[in-house]
Image (cartoon, rainbow, N blue to C red):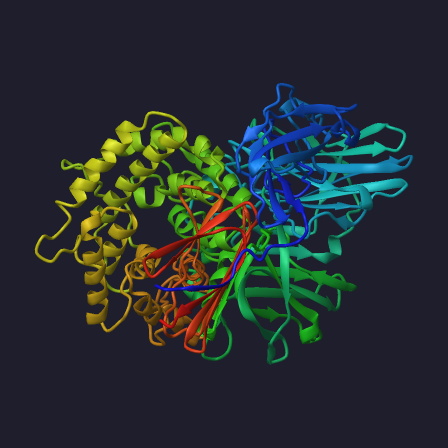
Amino acid sequence: MLFVVLMMQGCRTGGTEIVNMQCEYQNHPIGIDTQSPRFTWNYAGDTTWQQSAFRIILADSPRGLKRKGEGFRWESPITQSSQMLTAYTGSNPLKPHTTYYWQVETNGADGRKHVLSPVATFETAKMNQTDWVAHWITDGQERTEHVAPFLRRTFEVKGKIVQARLYVSAAAYVKLELNGQRLCSTSLNPGYTHYDHRNLYCTYDATSALRQGQNVLTAVLGNGFYNEIDRLGVWDFDNASWHGRPRLMCELRLTYADGRIETIASDKSWQVSQSPFLVNDIYSGDTYDARFEQPSTWKACILAEAPSPNLVAQQMPPIEVDTIYHPVSLRSIGDSIYVIDFGQNMSGYARLTLQGPAGTMIKVQHGEELDSDGRLNVDRITGLFDKGKGFGFQTDVYTLSGRRDVLRPEFTYHGFRYIEVHTHPDVKINKEDVEALFVHTAMQPAGWFSCSNDTLNLIWKAVRQSYLSNFMSIPTDCPQREKNGWTADAHISQEIGLLNFDSFTSYEKWLEDMIDNQRSDGQIADIIPSSGWGYGVNPVWSAALFIIPMNLYLYSGDLRPIERALPYCRNYLHFLAGHETERGSIAGGLGDWVPYNTRTPEEFTSTCYYYYINHLTARFCELLGQDGVQYASKAEQLKQLLNTDFLDSETGLYSNGSQAAQGTALYLGIVPQQRQQALAELLSRMIIQGGGHLDFGMLGSKTVLRMLTRYGHVDQALDMALRQEAPSWAAWIAQGHTTPPEEWIPKEGSSLNHVFLGDINAWMMQSLAGINYDPQQPGFRHIIIEPCFPHRLQWAEGRYQSRAGRIVSRWERRDHQIVLTIEIPVNTTATLRLGGKEREVGAGKHILLLPEQ
């Protein structure tokens, strides 16, 4: 392809500056507890700047950064590298409760002068378990008691406070207030873990919530997945090894202007009472009596056992309220039932502000659809919910106090677009009385895509909404029926997260959950965390243990996730080797889940992924300088098996000839190079013969669009996606869905908010906008720009805040030409791939004219 460069290097006249300095992938974090924190940075300014070397300077006072003055702690060796990532390797351990100041000093290529960064900070929390002086406390009730514990501690502040840090853990959740002020917008923290292996604590800046004189710290504790009292789901959480009465551990550390340190710790001095939360269940909802908001009697709390020996600072963002939606319609049915539509499917809950006679009961049920009479219909998603125990599904129950009550659940969340409110005829509800709170792990946006096709934009938006709805400290399948961390759902949708959000720390946290989940024989469960449910032979699902760290490396250049995962990957492969068939395949497990029509045999998909995870493990060993020959050899054996026993020599197709089988074989690198284009042509032809329709499930949704595009059939891929009749992504939009359903044609028992068929969102960024990492130089230090120009689009644009900086790729048709505009961040390079030709470009803005496609 001939292309004309209109502008190159968009060079700025200013100097070079270091920006976006992060510690542990966070800006100025205050809860670091690792002894080897990582540092990252980007550049702005002169686009010709190329880093050749760097060093880090660390101190515990700003003066220590200057000429190694008082407070200097460490200076890294000068590292000859263009990489914008390193870690603390000093011999002196980092101290707890300490603010550290750091700078990076870098040298330019060709002997150019150095650049010194601004000063950035991070603050340590508890560096060892022995740094805690607090104890776990609870109310002493049996774990089967429904009423939530309500704890409090009063204390006095005597003097000017310059800093206050609150370190708080709970099993499972805590509604925490300091002088009536929330420190977090939800009570769904800290993050969900295998509670008997590891507990998380959150760190809050409590300085502004304090006042001179008397203060009060209160905590109401919720069950979450830690203590499912009533078996309302089928996943055995009521019998989990970790369950127990909810409990709290916290420390409020006060630093006075005169240097005094005071710690208010959870201990026997705390008081406890009954809370207004009469019931709370993660699947059912909260029952709340506003008449009991002010307890009249208090008694001493009791000390409790730690749920686990491992208390770790939470590095991923907390679960927070994101968007507040207002009703698009409110309809009354009779004089006491209201059906309210918020116009958007989401995770979270409704918030009502009402006033009525004391003792009036309000029931709020959440759901995804209405029946033909306009009433809420939850039948589709209640098949796994035990309706015989007197609890309503996704239903919050409130009793009014007689005052103006603000009503919302605290210890549950729901998947919903609609609510149905049952009230008393004397209590009237108007639109302004009701809001919907969209709640999820508060990952910051990192990627944006748009194009000339409105339907494609709506698909992108719907998948993005579903991804957020399904990240609640773990990646989940759906926010209503299950709320489980299904492993295949997570690895299939991971690139959606990495291309749309700053999700690195969230996936690192879930990697630790997978490690905690692994049994001594190497197997991991299909849902993580798990009570013990879901273990078995299932390599397509268990591949998450391998794919999650690999993608983190490819998108960041950081080897730490691979270092952490590799021993457990070895254990799993040892387990799997004991379950081979006589010919060496894996016959069990799940495969191309929820296909439209054609089911791909699981022995084929399981063996494909058995090959792939051996291949990844060999690559892990290579990256870490370890011997991976056994895994490379095993991968080659499995590839040969797949290309003999599972390939039809007459048709040239794999397995039963399904679309998913061909897409998976191409995507995972199983097809010999000399046969790849031919197989892609066969895949294209079978889709044409099938009327242009897709016919696959989860694995095909990840692979078929990508493989059609890679081998020259992007127009066919887009046509398949945009078909108005089912099955297709566009059909969902035409049907009015605002998040992708679980199945191409939703049926009884399926969710309307499932992200695992949504990889088309990532495909848009990578194939239509053309923004891709280079696996040989991960972390976007070198960028592959490879946009496609399908005839149905007039323009497309992707913007991505990568680990190396902001990348932009936009193209549009203009005057029988294509105008391509790309922006490459400072200190990176890119390869532009168009029509089989390549061109190397540097940082800056480039505008190119291409012949019309």
Q: Position of residue 507 (x, y in %)?
A: 50, 43
Q: Nearer the viewer, residue 376 or 264?
A: 264
Considering the image in quadrants, where does the N terminus appear? bottom left
Image position of 163 (left or right of 470): right
Q: Position of residue 634 (x, y in %)?
A: 23, 33
Residue 221 image-quadrant placement:
top right
Q: Position of residue 837 (x, y in %)?
A: 34, 57
Residue 245 image-quadrant placement:
top right
Image position of 575 (left or right of 584): right
Q: Nearer the viewer, residue 781 or 639?
A: 781
Image position of 1 (left or right of 733): left
Q: In this view, does 172 lie above or below 403?
A: above
Q: Is residue 494 visible to the viewer in this orientation of the structure? A: yes
Furthest residue toward top: 91
Q: Is residue 737 visible to the viewer in this orientation of the structure? A: no
Considering the image in quadrants, where does the C terminus appear? bottom left
Question: Disc count in the image?
Answer: 0
Q: Which residue is drawn at 35% across and 35% down?
A: 619
Furthest residue toward left: 650
Image position of 590 (left or right of 140): left
Q: In this view, does 471 lie above or below 190?
A: below
Q: Residue at x 64, y 56 (%)?
A: 321
Q: Residue at x 56, y 65 (%)?
A: 365
Q: In this view, does 493 lie above or below 191?
A: below
Q: Where is residue 675 in the image (x, y as percent from the top left)?
A: 18, 52
